[in-house]
Image: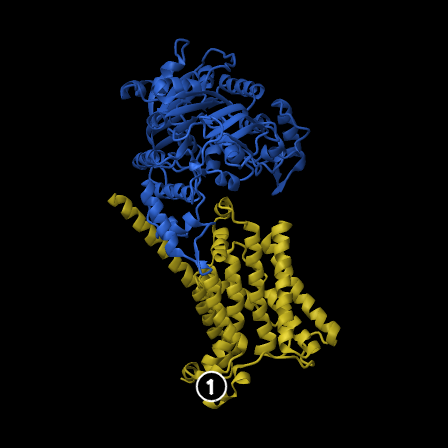
Amino acid sequence: MEALNVIFSVAFLAAVLRVSTPLILPALGGLISELGGVINIALEGIMLVAACTGVLVSVWTQSAWLGALAGVAMGTFVALVLAFFHLNLKADLILAAIALNLLASGGTIFVVYLVTGDKSSTSRLVSGQMPFLSDFIPGVRALGEIGRLLDQNVLTYAAFVLTAVVALFLYRTRTGMHLRAVGENPEAARSVGINVRRMQYLALVLSGVLAALGGVYLSMGYVKFFARDMTGGRGFIALAAIYLGARKPLGVLIAALVFGAAEALSIQLGNLRVPTQLVQIIPYFATLAALVIYAVVQRQRALARQRAFVQSRAAR
Amino acid sequence: MPSPLLVPMSQNTPYIVEMRDISKVYPNGVRANDHVTFAVRPREIHALVGENGAGKSTLMKILYGMERPSSGQIFVRGKPVSIHSPHEAIALGIGMVHQNFMLVPSFTIAENVVLGAEPVRRRLLDYKAAVAITRQLSAQYGLEVDPEAPVEAVPVGMRQRVEILKALYRGADVLILDEPTAVLTPQETHELFTAIRQLVQSGKTVIFISHKLREVKEISDRVSVMRNARLVDTVDTAAVTEEQLARMMVGREVFLHVDKAPLRRGEPVLQVRSLEYVTEAGVETLKGVSFNVHEGEILGVAGVEGNGQTELVEVIAGLRPATAGQVLLCGQDITNASPRQVRQAGVAHIPEDRLTNGAALSMSIAENLIVDRYERPPFTRGGLLQPTAIKENAEWLIEQFAIRAPDGDVPVGSLSGGNMQKVVLARELSAQPKLLIAAQPTRGVDIGASEFIYEQLVRARDNGVAVLLVSADLSEVLSLADRILVMKDGQITAVFDNTPSLTEEEIGYYMLGVKRMSAEAIAARA
């Protein structure tokens, strides 16, 4: 009963939005790269680099916005490196991305150690935080529970707006259409004069920008410090969200929210008398279950399509 | 957009496209086009025919800017041009419909038609305009499509119309159709021909690549025949018969002399019983084929390509599942056995496409020579590959089969066609098979290597191997085979003993379906 009360509360909904943000943003980025035919496995590493850079630059400049800007720039740079390795030097995309993830994990904490002498986090530094809605409209706090729901970080709002922007880009612009054509049949795209490599560069760079925004949110919104491996596999859960969301922007948003809800639930239940081990597996179990459901649905759809085809042939 | 056809022709050329003295030599020394001169009149349907590998695709790739000629000149509407990319070809009003379609499956037909040159309104895609454009072109040229259906959901015939619409949308006046009927059902072929005629009536010119002579006779105004990288002749279609065209295509200038010992025919090795095969797309390519191949004989399978020979070979080799019927090897049922089981039962297979199925191009000669036996001693002991045994095996076979290569470590892809085929032959014959299937064994192979391959096939026969030879080259079949079986539309239409009185003309009648033996006569001889 207690658990149900927790789930059906405004506070829980607010928590879902908070923890979903660093999944939605990289998942949108991953979606663009996937549709461009160059799935970006380095989302995790890009998020880490962006999170770390954001914190350090915000400390140095005393500006959260400059920190965020630097974080996004650095994350995008990592994506560019990946694109260069894969598209120019013909390195395997997956291997190059794994290398970058490992480099990001060790590299960020190394820099943190150089700067602070601490090998675990930047909690001793006073770093910036991206503003919340109440920083612009102080009145929201007075709205009680609804106010708490609305008082989200600017990057949480950005995640929802960007879902629409990404959808518009992919399906209503020429560039987006070219990008999808390249991902699905590069030969066909090349034969009509589309520059395949340029489109794949674009796909990877955009995925870098979005993943970096997710990373910046983690260290400068969700919390106010950088900690070793603080992404905790969110870059990989984001990848799962792409497929669970059927490779469509709205689907990806919903999938990321489902994963976010599972994570929020595990946090809330942690406060109750439920074994922590059990609680901690919820997000991963949700991921697994979601992927199984997705696979089953896809198979049934394929079977139905086949049956329809056979019937239409028979009818002829 | 204004049609370039309205631009007056410069000079007094009767041709819209003229390719003069075109040669193409690939870096590996293969000569694909040898001083070819090819000219197309405006508003004609010009068929370009020839066996696979005769050079027609290369010639058209040169015209479409996908390949550069080694020498020669191209004129479009009388003006000399050099075409460096498909983009430039399109700008000159030349469009090409490839055999494997260049379409994005999840996109709708309208999206595919406009891809790369999309209509835009207020900086966003104007999908409605794309649909309207597609509808309009579709109506104008009688190419019926459903603009809003995703390409993956429509039949092959409609996909092909989408490709033609794509070319028309980009302003093509000359349309190159690369074996357009290869993937179509007879009904779809009929629809395509109607559409082609309508295209020509509205001022377009069509180049129709094919090796199906019946279709060429039906649709074209003029025919150019290619053979062995050369253009044999260009003639008015009405002035020639299918038989004459077939002779021009197959030719008989290279008549290699083959010494054969008298036939010592033994027990049947391969028995094929009422074999049927239906492709995934539902096309029946084998319709009840039955025959035997005996110890010590070469059975040649003749026929125009695409009459079920490829499927027959691949079903026997275990590469495709039979839909019905039986394949027996020395009495043992190997129907639908895996390729490895088929090989272990004693079948060796020289596939018709050595570049994809015959050899792993990036791997070495030594590795290619053991791909069918690497897991057995002496090449593997205790789960580990034995480099010395592999090397010795390679050295021995390189010498025995006169493969021209410095050593066994050379990647097969760097060899010439003839030497590559010798590697395949060496592997297959050294497996000491009971049955050797040789599909197009000398295609793209120089004369010297061809002669060597003939000798080896005959030697295998003399040693008691049953040889099933499938070849589109009639003179090859006539000089090697002891018995000849003719395939047409997935059926056996004739079986001959190869006596000196048997002529190419006679076989040709059966290949083209003009004549046909009775079922009893076939059953008695097959």
Residue B245: percent from the left, percent from the top? Answer: 40, 20
**Tint applied to chain A in the drawing:** yellow
Q: Is residue B79 visible?
A: yes
- Seen from the viewer's position, the closer of residues B161 and A46 is B161
Q: Chain of mark 1?
A: A
- Seen from the viewer's position, the closer of residues A272 and B433 is A272
Q: Give the vertical position of B471 relative to B157 (above or below).
A: above
Q: Left of A188 or right of it: where is B426?
A: right
Where disc 1 sits, the SS reads helix
- Seen from the viewer's position, the closer of residues A224 and B427 is A224
Q: Residues within 10 Å of mark 1 (few under 14, many from 20)?
A: some
Residue A3: percent from the left, percent from the top? Answer: 43, 82
Indicate the quadrant where residue B526 lies. top left
Q: Residue at x 34, y 44 (%)?
A: B138
Residue corresponding to mark 1 = A147
Q: Which chain is blue?
A: B
Q: Left of B235 or right of it: where is B371?
A: right
> In the rendered picture of this protein, how many numbered marks are placed on residues?
1
